[in-house]
Amino acid sequence: MPVNRPPPALEKAKRIKLLDIVVISIVAVVIIAIYYRVEHVLVYRWNWGLVFEYFVRIDEATGDILPNLFLKGVAMTLRLAFWGTIIAAVIGIVMGLCRVSNSLFLKAVSRLYVELIRNIPPVVFIFVFYFFISSQIIPLLGLDNIAYTASPNTIAVLEVLFGPIGLFTNFLAGLICLAVFEGAYITEIVRAGIQSIGKGQWEAARAGGLSRFFVLRDVILPQALKTILPPLASQFIILVKDSSIVSLISVQELTFLTQDVSNTTTQFFESWMLTAALYFMMCFPLAMLFQRFERTGLGIQKH
Amino acid sequence: MSNSEASHFLQIKGLGKWFGQFCALWDINLEVNSGERVVVCGPSGSGKSTMIRCINLLETFEAGEILIDGEKLVNNPKKILAIRRKVGMVFQNFNLFPHITVLQNLMLGPIRNLNLSKSEAAETAMKYLEKVQIPEQAKKYPSQLSGGQQQRVAIARALCMNPEMMLFDEPTSALDPEMISGVLDIMVELAEGGMTMIVVTHEMGFAKQVADTMVFMDHGEIVEVAPPEQFFTNPQSDRSELFLSQILSH
Ligand SMILES: Nc1ncnc2c1ncn2[C@@H]1O[C@H](COP(=O)(O)OP(=O)(O)O)[C@@H](O)[C@H]1O
Ligand SMILES: [Mg+2]
């Protein structure tokens, strides 16, 4: 029997080397220099305290601690991201399936949708589409009446899910814009995933007597899912960041409210640096989480 | 066996097939009786796969017609499902579904097309896994099997639909040499059981053993149809003679 010899210890790359110290020093010097220039050349007065006040506020009458603009913005951004992902995923799956369907018409619709959105700047799309939905679709839904007809409990639940009831149509407009926009990218992800499955699988499934529906459901989609999930996860993170574009149509999410804070306080640098940190804190953990899923394979059979 | 129209299980009349401008099949005529074993051979690219893929409508065709059980093939989803119940197919590259177990591979068609219950489908699946002599592999995934075992699973998968005819497209071409005989044995057994079969293969030993009819194709056409005794000893066309000399020379 061979002796069980331990493997040679590999040198870990964890020790800090001279080069690392040099790089870190340079970065530190640059940051300090910028800070110095902002303060002394632009004669900018840093006031982080003032900006931090916009996290929570104390209700003067009751003494309750209430969320202020930053937290409200984060909440709204998270709502947009959550519902936006669900709706965009549904749009993406439906349009992705249209793209690989037999019907020339459905293929054309899906292609047109994807190409339109990919070839128009997001900002322009948002304005055009917002005009369309706010004037055409939302009045049709008659949502403005909900605030007057629903019970207080229903309203409380709705407010957690969709934000302040008064801003509901505003939120919905932003949500639809965002979902339609991101849905185009998810369509492409779904299409690529389905098309990554070899012709042989389609043929074997069809020759085995499966209808088109079951070919997709039982054979193609379960396999395509492995290809689809990693880019879908990245797209979700992109969606969180992209949600800031709906600030352009006055949806009161983090970016929009940061403009408020920076205008009222005139502490421009602090407000936006703080918001950058808040976006980072939303996206980075998600990225880590998805990376972990990818390593562990999301519990999907690896065969 | 009588030669009357009624007893032909499969009739191909004037079949023509184009890929764009390229004519892959031209004026194919072939009749196959119930229980008949037809072996198709010919050079690579001669249209053998394309022809048998037309029979279960994996390919559409532009000219001619195909009748199965006297009924004309039409491109209509319901009819296609019925055809695929009657005609099973085995591919060169097995094409097992890699994300589900061997047993689930076998159960899918019967559940989705024959509307069997799960337990009925599992029972059928085990029956055919025993027939191809690998019941112990039922719970494994296709990637855990050897090529020969995978091809046997593919044969069992087609048999689970209880087809009246089986199409084989070079079923041993992708196999390591030591795996080939195991798969051919299964096919011989199937032939002896009376299955109607069309087999595209270059295994001439197998052809001599089971074929009732040899079909030789070249350049999208059927060049010769003959009983094996005649085909192997006295081919009627130069092209089949050349092909045979090439394939039997080593
Ligand atoms: N999907 C396709 N598109 C274009 N040409 C094809 C396609 N499938 C097959 N062909 C062509 O048709 C001819 C016959 O192919 P095939 O039936 O696969 O031949 P064989 O099985 O006899 O080797 C070949 O020349 C091949 O290149
Ligand atoms: Mg071929």
Image: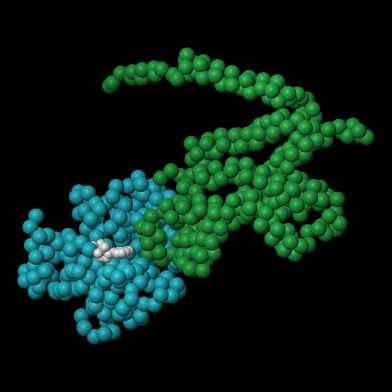
Chain colours: A green, B cyan
Question: Is residue B243 in view?
Answer: yes
The residue depicted at 61 percent of the width and 53 percent of the height is: A181
Quarter of the figure with the C terminus of chain A: top left
What x and y, as percent, mark residue A80? 68, 47
Residue A282 place in picture, x, y as percent: 64, 36
User: Up-down: is A160 above or below B217?
Assistant: above
| Residue plotted at (19% across, 50% down) | B177
Depicted A131 relative to depicted B241: above or below: above
Q: Residue at x 30, y 60 (%)?
A: B91
Corner quadrant of residue A274: top right
Q: Quadrant of the N terminus of chain A?
A: top left
**Residue most extreme to the top:** A18
Judged from the image, the quadrant occupied by ligand 2 is: bottom left
Q: Residue furthest right?
A: A61
Q: A246 or B45: nearer the eye?
A: A246
Where residue B58 sits in the image (x, y, percent)? 36, 67
Residue A203, image quadrant: bottom left
For this rendering, which residue is in front, A254 or A123? A123
Residue located 6% across and 69% down the image: B233
The outermost residue toward the front is A41
- Whether residue B190 is visible here, answered yes or no, is no
Q: Image check: A173 left or right of A291?
A: right
Lateral position of residue A123 relative to residue B158, left or right: right
Q: Count of labels shown?
A: 0
Report x, y in % for residue B42: 18, 65
Using the image, determine if residue A212 lies above or below residue A92: below
